[in-house]
Amino acid sequence: MNTMEQFTCDDISAVLSGLLDGELDERRQHVADVHLAKCERCRTMVNEAEELDAEVRASVSAREEACWSDELERRILLSINDPVTEWRSQRRLRISAWSGWATAIAALIMVAFLLVFENGGSNSGGSAEDINRLASSNTNTNANSGAHRDVQAKGVNEGASSEAVAANRSVVEDEGDDSVVSSDEKLIDENRFALNDDANANDNSEEGSVKGDADAGASDAVTVNDSGFTAIDLLGDYSSISSRLAVFVPDERSASAPLFEGNEESASETDREAESAIDSSRVASGGMVGDDEGGGGGEGVEVAGNAELNDGNVEGASDVALRLASVDGPADEGDDEVVSSEDDWRYGTDDVLFNAAVALHALADANVDSFSDVREINQALEYDDLLDKLAESREEMRSEDASIVDRAWAALEWVSGPVDQAQLVRVQEMIADENLVNRLETLSDEYGTY
Amino acid sequence: MSLSEGEFAKLMKTLGPRLVALSQGICRDRDTAEDIVQEAFVKLWRTPPDGPEAVIPSWMRRVVTNLSINDLRRRKRASSLPEFSTDRALRDDRRPEEKIDLADNLRRVDEALAKLPDEKRAIIVMRVYEQMSYQEIAEVLGIPVGTVMSRLNRAREALKDLVAAGLDRAEDEPMVFRLDRGMGSS
């Protein structure tokens, strides 16, 4: 691949998807545009790819109308109203909370009845004054009780029924108005009114409380997710991420051997490893971007190669992020059954071979007058652990394929140590003579589970 | 966020068809796609996402994509050829020969999509049909963002080859076949 200032046709092929999808950074987009402006062949290639995309869209869209049916809609509505659902159980919870209060209210009303009748029985010719005194005392008790509950309700839930407050207030006002109370029946009605409103307030507060708890739970979940996305987006706050990892995915640590190699049981060790991995990736991506922006012709690693190498470089940190994502993010989004152990969608042999091809490509075009390109490639190899991964990959290959990997490994390993200009030229000749880049790409396709 | 039944029904009508198409595009199986979309809507009803209602479409898209990918991973089975309808493609004002060309093109692309390995097809549908960002795709597939571009490149390349192979086959077909087909359908 070529330097930042110029793209070849091969470079355009390598970044074709980024071009079509508008996912290239501004600088690479500009360099690609410059090439496309003068290369008809590449313009045709891009146009054809765009047409194919449009046909894919049309092909999938063709199902939209055909796929939706009233029957499906009915099935969905039935399933959300399934009596076994969580929704129903929540509703039951609310009903049972209400019924608890209803029982308490009924008991209080009975007590009030008993008190009234007891008084009436012991003093059948009781004066209106006695009745009023009784009414006053009962009202007082209930009003206080109601007010107390209301305060509790408000303490739990700011949104507790304001009607309850009004009701209690009206009862308290009635308390001072002896002439209003003319009969036991009216008194009892008032008590019932006040208590019912209390019950409403408390019922509301109960709901508020349940809802509040649920909200708290939800915000916890969001916190976890936020951490996951923070890790992906900003590569920040890694200590909390890794401690979450230690809590949520203890088994994953053993699976992520390269990242947590030498890691024992301690979470702090995990923290340090994760920190190191993330720092590495930060250095890798930041360093390369910095070089590119420096604009030194000989300093910058080639654009497309750079991008691909960066892809590999962030693997370590992404490993952390994707483990988080597989535990937190997708689980929140319907991914209840995360299939990961035999997951061949992830970084596999084909990805290793492809990244090795990209590294070789960059090496083949590396500037022999300045070793900055080679240094960048070495950094990428190191961060991506590519040499070890290549060595592991060859174990599962046919012997004739393994020999290609051996040659690629040798070329990359050669420049991983001190290398002089003459050696670098020889490595470049070897890569070209043996057509290693293309052979590795072909192998990548052959071994792709993806 | 809580949804009323009216809001839920409205969302079902507006999002449903596209979600089924998305899922079927990935899974290549209509029954599975319907089950997945049903599951996604039940999830929406029970545990809707936090935030304003505007987040629901992208949330649902991710739920359906995740469920579809998981289904593919579980089944690992050979995809069946699609039940493809050209009705929509033909429902326009193009001239008859253009309609036939268009329908043929779509059929070829659809057949090529069906023959693509699951993972390649999924990533193409996610990007090309659903317009998901590389970041979103990376999160769903659990791969680095940069790898998305190289995988998409390879998937598009493979699709192009399959479509070209289909075209070659079509060109090799004797004309009498086309005539027979035309007469048979009339």
Image: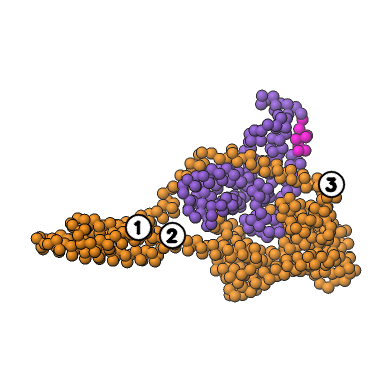
Chain colours: A orange, B purple
Amino acid type shown at disc 3? Glu
Task: Using residue A259 as the reference point, say whether residue A144 is left or right of it.
Answer: left
Residue A393 image point, x, y percent = 72, 61
Residue A131: horizontal and vertical position, in percent?
16, 62
Label 1: element kind: helix
- Residue that numbered label 3 is attached to: A40
Name the chain letter of the residue that bears numbered label 2: A
Please give left or right for residue A155 compared with residue A326 in the image: left
- Give the percent coordinates (x, y) of residue A125: 9, 60
Q: What is the number of the mark on residue B80?
A: none
Can residue A3 be seen? Answer: yes
The residue at the point 84 percent across, 69 percent down is A371
- Secondary structure state at the residue bearing disc 3: helix
* Co-location on one chain, circles 1 and 2: yes
Between marks 1 and 3, how big is the CA–CA gap? 76 Å
Residue A163: mark: 1
Q: Is residue A327 above or below residue B116?
A: below
Work out whether residue A406 can be spotted.
Answer: no
Quadrant containing the N terminus of chain A in the rendered view:
bottom right
**Quick check: A259 above or below A197?**
below
Q: Which residues are magenta?
A: B167-174
Q: Are there few (<14), some (14-19), or many (20+) residues within 10 Å of tag 1?
A: few
